[in-house]
Amino acid sequence: MANGSRQAVWEFFGTELKRRRENAELTQVELGARVFVSGGYIGQFEQAIRKPQLDVAQRIDEVLQTDGIFERLCRKLIDDPRYADYFAHVVELERLATRICEFAPTVVPGLLQTKAYARAVTIAANPFKTDAYVDEIVAARLERSLILDDAARPEYWVTLHENVLRIPVGGPQAMAAQLDHVVRLVHERSAVATVLPYAAGAHAAMGGSLKLLDFEDAPPVAYTETEYSGTLIDDPAVVKHTLRTYDLLRVAALSPEASLALIESAAEDFRRCASTT
C-alpha cells in the first residue's frame, strides 16, 4: 500500500473513531480511561497524528461495540509480511518522525543498509527461505531507507558499536561498500554517525538495539529490540529512561569527526582485504 493510501486509511480510522465515540456519548478522556491510554492520545488517534497499537484498537472495539472495525483497519495498515509483527508499527512511525536516534550494537541499522548488506543479513537469518522471499525483505528495507532521501527527512542520529564496523557481513567487498555508504550519508548531512569504541567497555544499552522517535505534534516513543522480539514503548517514564540511556551512549562515543575517520579506516581495511582475496 502506498504511503498516501495508508495515510488516507489512518485518517478514515480517526474520523470513524471520533464519530463512534461521540455516538457513544464519551469524551476523549472517558474513552481513553476505558482503553488505558490518555485522552490526549485518543485525540491524536482521531487526528491521525499517532497510530494506535493493535491491542488498543481491540480495546476500542470492545468499549464502543464496533464489531472489530478498528482492529481490522489496524491490521490492514500494520500487517505487512515483509516485517515482523512487532516491527510493522515502527515502520509507520518512522515515516512520521521528525527525529530518529538509534543505537546499533552488532548490525548496521536498516535505514543505512545497502542492498548487498541487507541481503547478507537476511539470508543469515533465513537460510532456508527462497530467493523470492529474500528479495522481498531486502526491497522492503531499501524502501524504508528512502525517508533519508526525502526533502522532509527526519534528523537521523546513529551510534554504532565498533562491532558493526568489524563484522564482515557479506564479505569484505560488500562491507567496504556498506561503510562507504554510511560515510556518504554523513557527508551529505543525511545522518550524524558516531561510534562507540571497544575501549568504552561496558555501556548503557548492552541488552540490544535502541531507537528513539520524536514527532512534531505527539510525545516521543522508544523501541527496543533483541534477536527475536521488539518492544514499542510510549509510557512517558520509560521513554525518559531510554532517552537517558541514549545520552549515556553518546557521551561514551567518539566525536563525529573521530567516528567518521574510524568508519573510513575500517572501509579501507575491508577494501585491502578484498583486493588480496
Image (cartoon, rainbow, N blue to C red):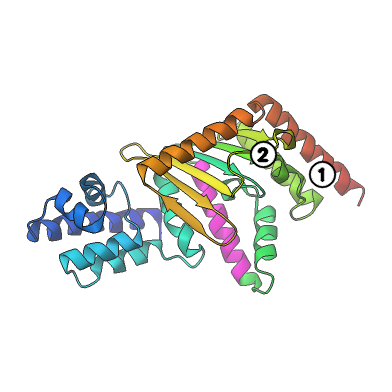
Where is residue 62, by image quadrant? bottom left
Q: Earlier in the sequence, mark 2 or mark 1?
A: 2
Our reading of the magenta stretch's main secondary structure is helix
Q: Secondary structure at mark 2?
A: loop
Q: Secondary structure at mark 1?
A: helix
Kind of residue sitting beneath label 1:
Phe
Residue 214 versus residue 56 in the image, above or below: above
Which mark is nearer the camera, 2 or 1? 2
For the point 49% across and 44% down, the residue is 147
Could you tell me if the residues under marks 2 and 1 are in contact, i.e. CB atoms within 8 Å? no
Q: Is residue 242 left or right of residue 217?
A: right
Q: CA distance from mark 2 to mark 1?
A: 27 Å
Q: Which residues are magenta?
A: 133-149
Query: Which x, y percent locates residue 164?
Result: 70, 45
Q: Nearer the viewer, residue 130 or 74?
A: 74
For the point 24% across and 58% down, the residue is 35
